[in-house]
Image (cartoon, rainbow, N blue to C red):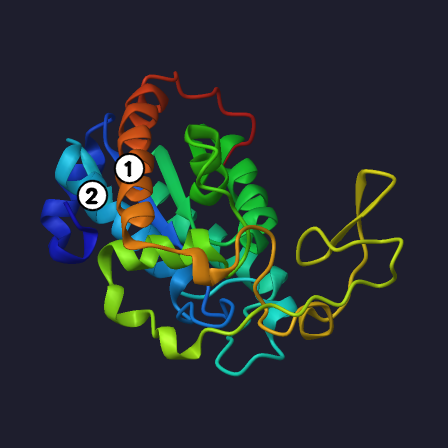
Amino acid sequence: MYLAHLNWQEAAKVFADPETLVVIPVGSTEQHGCVGPLGTDWLIPEEFCRRLNNQMQKIVIAPVLPFGVATHHINFPGTIDLGLEAMTAVMKQIFESLYRHGARRFAVVNGHGGNDPAIEKAALDLYRRGAQVTLIDWWGIAPKLNPEWPTGHGDAQEVAAVMAFRPELIKTEYLVDNVVTPPSDALPQAHINTVTFEGAPVKIIREIRDTVNTGGLGGLEAKFATIEWGTEMMNGVSDWMVRYLEEFRRIPLPAKKWTE
């Protein structure tokens, strides 16, 4: 069920049930390579949550949070950046509000890695009050399920995922090849802010537009995305999420370590 579709009296009954699992889709509004829509990071979690709603019982889907920590993408038009401190405060308030109503089990379906520190900080505070949060970064799960679904940012993996449910948002006339400019010949670029030295990954923090012209890097280029890849991947990850969340729901709640 969707939280936005309930009235407050219905919500009271839902949160009174200790088996209720609150699922919060979280993302970002930011650049995603040459053809990925700005909403990629929240559109995909929203779609996963739609599927979870159809497949699971005793879950309530919160409204999607479409903004996140996008400081490193701000030089691309259309990006909206909450920043780390604001994102942490927002997540704390979302958790706090639902906790006050009785919710104790939370799953965050996240579309943007830059959000992780904020979500983890807010989730740890909640854990100390007797609740449990799981953070699901879908893009990292996909290649573990199938190595043919490699991950990156604004690359073929994310473009393929969007193709699976909103193909009209992928405008192939904007496809261009990546031009990557590593810091030096001895430090090849592996990801947005990651290079390798003697085979070991290390971060060199730069503006993304100084690293790659499209803003997309890390996996296969966007031009290799297909709707078949996206459909298979979305289905596979969705099924995994259902199995995982049923197992997560069985975890005993932690003892309170902080008082109200």
Identify the residue shown where x is 62% and y is 61%.
85
Identify the residue shown where x is 56% and y is 64%.
216
Query: Taking 91 as reference, is 217 left or right?
Result: right
Disc 2: CA contacts within 10 A as few (<14), some (14-19) or many (>=20): some
- Give the position of the N terminus as an image quadrant: top left
Give 167 or 26, whichever is nearer the viewer.
167
Say what amino acid the circle numbered 1 marks: Ser
Q: Earlier in the sequence, mark 2 or mark 1?
A: 2
Q: Quadrant of residue 39?
A: bottom left
Asked whether the viewer can see residue 93, the reply is no
Query: Taking 230 as reference, is 117 left or right?
Result: right
Say what amino acid the circle numbered 2 marks: Arg
Give 4 or 192, whichever is nearer the viewer.
192
Figure check: 169 above or below 123: below
Identify the residue shown where x is 23% and y is 26%.
19
Identify the residue shown where x is 56% and y is 26%.
257
Asked whether the viewer can see residue 248, the reply is yes
Q: Secondary structure at mark 2?
A: helix
Q: Are marks 2 and 1 in contact (CB under 8 Å)?
A: yes
Q: Which residue is mark 2?
A: 51
Q: Which residue is mark 1?
A: 238
Figure check: 142 above or below 112: above
Q: CA distance from mark 2 to mark 1?
A: 7 Å
Disc 1: CA contacts within 10 A as few (<14), some (14-19) or many (>=20): many
Q: Position of residue 10 (x, y in %)?
A: 10, 46
